[in-house]
Amino acid sequence: MIKVYPSILAADLLNMGNDIERMLSAGVDGLHVDIMDAHFVPNLSFAPAMVSAIHKRFSDVWQDVHLMMDNPQDYLDTFMDAGADAVTVHAEIEADVGEILRKIRARGVKAGISIKPKTPAAAIEPLLDICDLILVMTVEPGFGGQKFMADMMPKISYLRKIGYPGNILVDGGVNAETAVQCVEAGADTLIMGTALLKAQNPSAVMAACRALEK
Ligand code: DX5
Ligand code: ZN
């Protein structure tokens, strides 16, 4: 089944609860929470308190937490204590990513690794056995609302070709149209910020995504 997670970076921050309710009514499969540290990316977003606030009010909603941070190793427990169901770190950081993935898994949380557009899929091959998901960035991380980079699709097909069995998520500029290429390449999870949260009719966007499964 293709899963769809809205990125709450595109929510109306003063109406976060309502926006999450709207997304759940449209039938999304979870929430994507972008954490930015102003070092790994030139932007700041949410703190662990956002994850715990969501967890308190929407305790059964899956939270896919994307750590765009230079030092995620110092915050893993904080985010998992807050209620993260999946924690993704970037392949490009200096810390020992293998050790980070093992620590996440040891707590029964899904461990993810993300690659920026300039990072080849081959760079994470040694880590494929110890991650539950791969998040392929289709924009330079840092901001919502950017243009989808279709030339990232071969990374997804390559990962499937070499037999990667876990989830492959696509993040950045994904909408009902660009989602077609993502699914064809082998992705099973679509992250959508602008395309879902700013949509007039998010249920129609969800229906278009669901139709991709057939
Ligand atoms: C970008 C973030 C994305 C972003 C997606 O750094 O990781 O999750 O919110 O937003 P859209 O779908 O608007 O490109
Ligand atoms: Zn993200």
Image (cartoon, rainbow, N blue to C red):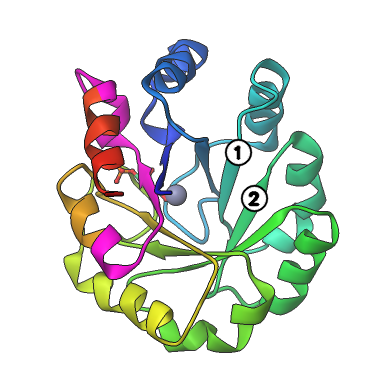
Magenta-span inclusion, residue 190: yes
Q: Quadrant of residue 82?
A: top right
First-in-chain label (1 vs 2): 1
| 129 left or right of 185 in image | right
Q: Is residue 72 above or below residue 27?
A: below
CA distance separating discs 1 and 2: 7 Å
User: Which span of residues is magenta-colored?
Assistant: 183-203
Give the residue pinned by disc 1: 63
> What secondary structure is marked by label 2?
strand
Q: Outermost residue toward the left?
A: 177
Confirm whether residue 96 shows in the render: no
Q: Give the percent coordinates (x, y) of residue 48.
A: 69, 37
Mark 1, ligand 2, within 8 Å: the answer is no
Magenta-span inclusion, residue 99: no
Q: Give the percent coordinates (x, y) of residue 13.
A: 44, 20
Give the residue pinned by disc 2: 86
